[in-house]
Image (cartoon, helix red, strand yellow):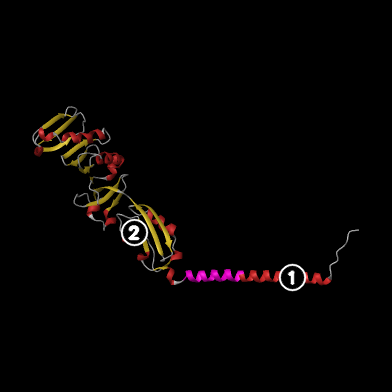
Amino acid sequence: MPEILSVSSTDLELRREKLRRNRQIQIISAIWRSFAITGLAVGLLWFLIQPTWVLKSKKDIAVSGNHLLSDETIQSKIKLSYPKSLWRVEPSSLSASLKQQPGITRASVTRRLFPPGLKVEVSEIIPVAITQTPSSVDSNAEKSIRGLVDLDGAWVSLENYKSIREDKLPQLKLIGELQQCRPFWKQLYQAVSKSSVPIMQVDCRDPNNIILKTELGSVHIGNPTSKLSEKIKLLAKIRRLPARVNMNQIEFIDLSNTETILVQMNHKTVRINSRNN
């Protein structure tokens, strides 16, 4: 028969005592871990609710990515009451609100811990022209609203850019209601910007007869959706007109028909075949 090992009652008691001690140690360790975690949480909460973590003024908002709008302008568009706990600020709500502001196409707001504050990063419209639009209240040309327009026809009043320097404004001027020329504005601007002859102004008050102010004088290009690139290229040929006409007597140049350049002078109209010029 197999040998049966006998265990004394003393050995059993020692083992039970060892197990009890191990369980006690585990319980005490668990209690200490709970105390430690609770203490850390309370300490962190106490630390975070201290006056240090409070927005005291707009100066605690750091702005980046802006080129036209000043830091102060963007800070003023963030509607907060001061002092404001940093942890009661909702960055996503502020970001969404900023995106709705004129001239801002993208906005991101995040908390900054050291030093406590907000970080605001924005993207603005890239203006390509400055507009002169008659006021909706008074059509008098002397009472007009100046603004900036981007490549896609988005318009922003210059009232939003009170701090911008004149030398930072686009050189190209757009006259007339933007709504009338918005359907063809992108195509028109891209053609104008590629012109070898400097163009200072685009007048779209009559959408069927766009008038360009160039260094050669006033140029009528007619409907901007018809052979636009070809009409703009004809401006280079007009530079040779001084040899054939008196430039001082020119009232305007008509390029609405790409086959024939019409030069309206004080008392006559000169027709020039654009193919042979």
Q: Is residue 173 above or below residue 38?
A: above
Foreground residue among 274 and 96: 274
The answer to which of 5 and 100 lies nearer the viewer is 5
| Left or right relative to 35: residue 116 | left
State the CA–CA distance, disc 1 to disc 2: 69 Å
Quarter of the figure with the C terminus: top left
Q: Range of the magenta residues?
A: 33-49
Looking at the rendered structure, the secondary structure element under dot 2 is helix
Residue 134 on the magenta segment: no
Q: Nearer the viewer, mark 1 or mark 2?
A: 1
- Badge 1: few (under 14), some or many (20 or more) residues near its Cα, within 10 Å? few
Number of residue marks = 2
Q: Residue 131: where, in percent of width, then height?
A: 24, 48
Circle number at residue 195 = none
Amino acid on which disc 1 is placed: Lys
Q: Is 240 located above or below residue 176 in the figure?
A: above
What is the number of the mark on residue 18?
A: 1
Q: Main secondary structure of the magenta part?
A: helix
x then y, percent, for residue 256: 21, 33
User: Toward which corner of the image does residue 250 lie, by quadrant?
Assistant: top left
Q: Quadrant of residue 54?
A: bottom left
Q: Position of residue 87 (x, y in %)?
A: 46, 65
Left or right of 246, for residue 258 = right
Which dot marks residue 74? 2
Amino acid type shown at disc 2:
Ile
Query: Mark 1 or mark 2, which has the lower sequence index?
Result: 1
Q: Residue at x 82, y 72 (%)?
A: 10
